[in-house]
Amino acid sequence: MEFIVILIGLSIIIWGAISWTIKTISNSNKYIELKPQFDSLKEARKTHESKVEKDKAELSSRIIKWEKKVENDKKEIIKISKQKSMGFPWLAEAYADYFALKDDEIEKYLKNKKHPAYTAAENVKIIKNEKRVLVKENKIISYKINYFEKLFPWLSELIAEDEDEEMPVRIEGDSNNDENEDRVKHYLTPEEYKSLPSVERNQMALDRYLKNRNKSKWAIGRDYEMYVGYLYTQKGYSIEYKGIIDGFEDLGRDIIAKKPNEVCIIQCKCWAQHKKIHEKHIFQLFGTTMEYWIRNFIENKKPKSFEEFSKFLNEKKLRPIFYTSTRLSEKAKEMANALCVEILESKPLGEFPRIKCNINSDGFGQSKIYHLPMDQQYDRTIIGNRSGEFYAYTVKEAENAGFRRAFRHRF
């Protein structure tokens, strides 16, 4: 019995060994049969991976080259766009085309991506066309502004930096431009204007005018010119305001201050501290000083030598003065020194009395009238021509001295 059990066990072991051997031989034959295919697939995978790496490197190189080209194109476009010329509207169109191409790429992407966004792509197309027109118009306007600023440096002072800035523009036919309208109303509510006594409402309007932080460059420049004019009045000069009164026709001279045998041609610039005065402004002041000399100091208006003009400058008979709240560039200082232009820099706007108390003579005697900064004749009113005229800080001060408000108010 034990023998039979041992025999059966041996039979099972032998059968297992034979089955294992047969299976191993079969697998070996399959391996030998499939190995060439496996090797072929392995080689194909290596080839494919190598091609992918090569394509990635090539694509990366193309992207870098494209980005460099785009950056160079942008630099060239910006460089060209800075040319101070208004005669190249085609340049504006090219500029617009360039940025339209970028929008084309966005449009194509939205249409061809895995889940296309056709509506968004169509909206991009519409916006692209509108943007192209606006970009073109914007560049043309920029060229013109840059061109005119190059010719007339003072134009930069009239360009608003903030859309809320008050600009010195009047619309013809506007009912608010009635010649006798009281501009004090612009600084008071209707209730305040009706209820307050004249002294109080005029003073309140003046206070709000002075505290207004949203003045345009033009208004700030006007205040600065009045301040500089007041300072020179205190020094005994008679003052003629050219910038305030003549506007675009001032030829770059804001104030003419006179004493016997001395004329100061003053240009005023009330700019932010981060800005610098450049040499073009010095050249403009020097040129307008020479023009004044030709018109006022040369007999029969016959041109004389530059040496004679230089003599007037050196003897201080004619003094070009640049008065500014900021600083000049080194080149501007160098040119000012060479051209005998006096520099007064870093001179901020200070406090000074704004109310002009003027005495007029008429057929009935003398009229004592005071003018607020928003009144019609304020800029043209010169103080100091008659005894008793003065600048007042407050309305009460003016009225206590016997002066009344001007009847015609419009600025």
Image (tube, rainbow, N blue to C red):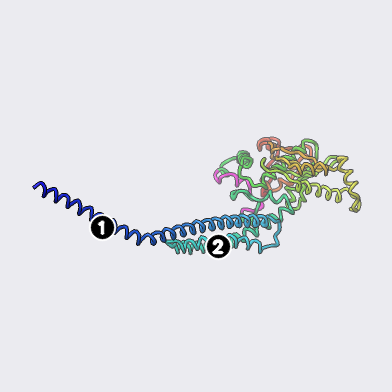
For badge 1, the amino acid type reads: Ile
Q: Label 1 belongs to which residue?
A: 22
Q: Which residue is mark 2?
A: 130
Picture quadrant of residue 239: top right
- Viewer-side residue, 164 vs 110: 110
Left or right of 190, for residue 263? right
Helix, strand or loop at mark 1: helix
- Indicate which label's residue lies in the foreground, 2 or 1: 1
In the displayed structure, does residue 295 sit left or right of residue 246?
right
- Is 186 magenta? The answer is yes
Q: Is residue 404 visible?
A: yes
Element type where label 2 sits in the image = helix
Q: Quadrant of residue 93?
A: bottom right
Say which quarter of the image contains residue 143. bottom right
Q: Give, as a single range, the part of the protein colored magenta.
A: 176-191
Q: Is residue 394 left or right of residue 47?
A: right
Residue at 8% across, 48% down: 1
Asked whether 311 or 2 is in front, the reply is 2
Q: Residue at x 56, y 58 (%)?
A: 62
Q: What is the x, y in percent for residue 283?
A: 79, 48
